[in-house]
Amino acid sequence: MGLVILAIIIVFVLILVFTNIRIVPQAHAFVIERLGKYKTTWNAGLHIKTPFIERIVRTVSLKEQVLDFPPQPVITKDNVTMQIDSVVFMKVFDPKLYTYGVENPMAGLQNLSATTLRSIIGDMELDQTLTSRESINARMQQVLDQATDAWGIKVTRVEIKNIQPPKEIEEVMTKQMRAERERRQTVLEAQAHQEAVVSRAEGDKRAKILAAEAERDAQVALAEGRAKSIQLVYEAEADGIKMLNAAEISDGVLKYKGIQALKDVADGRSTKIFMPSDITKVVETLGVAGEAMGIGDAIKPDDRPRKKPVPKADPCIGPETSRGGVAAAMTSEAINMDVSDPKALDRDYTPKNEQDIGE
């Protein structure tokens, strides 16, 4: 009988011991009371509770918690009512204050958040409210953190999740946004048009400058070509005279050349005949003199205009060629046609006006 009672006592003691062994998980804390009074706070690890005397009052999570409170109606300084949804990030830093500081910490934090939000938004106008979220977040976080220190709560961050203005205000804001975008579009189009006009004007200016430079270069090249051609003609004549002097031409050859010159002079178009000084030696030319004096069968002078040789077309000249280029081409062709004519040296090959260039 005694053994049975001893066994029962041993079993009861073991059950009592095992039921009072507690393991506190990581990031948690147990608040312990002894005989209704705060005794200690158990952190993570193995702990043994005194039976019948101590009890676990509250299990507290030390992790950071996210509290998403429902939207709160607030009124701005310009009397606009809107719904604002806020999110509060908090964690418990003192389990004892969290347990004994306030009856319901979450409800207290929610109400405190709502009242603080109304107080802050009440000092702002609508436009300022929509553009000052960071300022609102910082002020709320400061106020809530300071107020909840006595509750063992640390408010780490506050965020304005959503701001919902009235529908009438949304319509007005939509129209304002559309007008602003149209204004920006108009300004951008005006700036683009201005840049295009400036670019076009600069391009025209550059083109005119290049055309003027090209015409100047053409005129310079034309003058240089004319001077060079005249110089070459005179040099050729001088070389011809030197060659004639060196050849010691006989009188017969000179007379023959003189007769050929008279033939060119009396080509049926002249009204005067130039006779050589030694007329007694060229009696055979008296027939020509008789015609000039009206004796015998006189030949009527040919008054028809001479046929001017048609210059060859320059394949390099086109509609895009400048006036200087056209004038240079005309001068080159005229010099090529008249280079054998001694009288060509006294001509001016430069076109007098644009009509001459066009012809």
Image: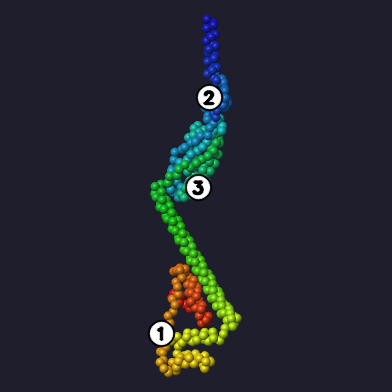
Closer mark to the observer between disc 2 and disc 1:
1
Label of residue 208 in the image: none
Closer mark to the observer between disc 2 and disc 3:
3
Q: Earlier in the sequence, mark 2 or mark 3?
A: 2
Label of residue 132 in the image: 3
Residue at position x 45%, y 43% in the image? 162
Task: Check the image and report above or below for 301 versus 200.
Answer: below
Q: Mark 2 and mark 1: span between their CA atoms?
A: 142 Å
Image coords of residue 68 (percent x, y): 47, 37
Q: Earlier in the sequence, mark 1 or mark 3?
A: 3
Q: Is residue 13 left or right of residue 85?
A: right
Alpha-carbon neighbours of circle 1 within 10 Å: few (<14), some, or many (≥20)? few
Residue 331, visible in the rendered structure: no
Which element carries disc 1, helix, strand or loop? Answer: loop
Residue annotated with mark 1 = 304
| Quadrant where the image shows the C terminus | bottom left
In the foreground, 240 or 288: 288
Image coords of residue 172 (percent x, y): 40, 51
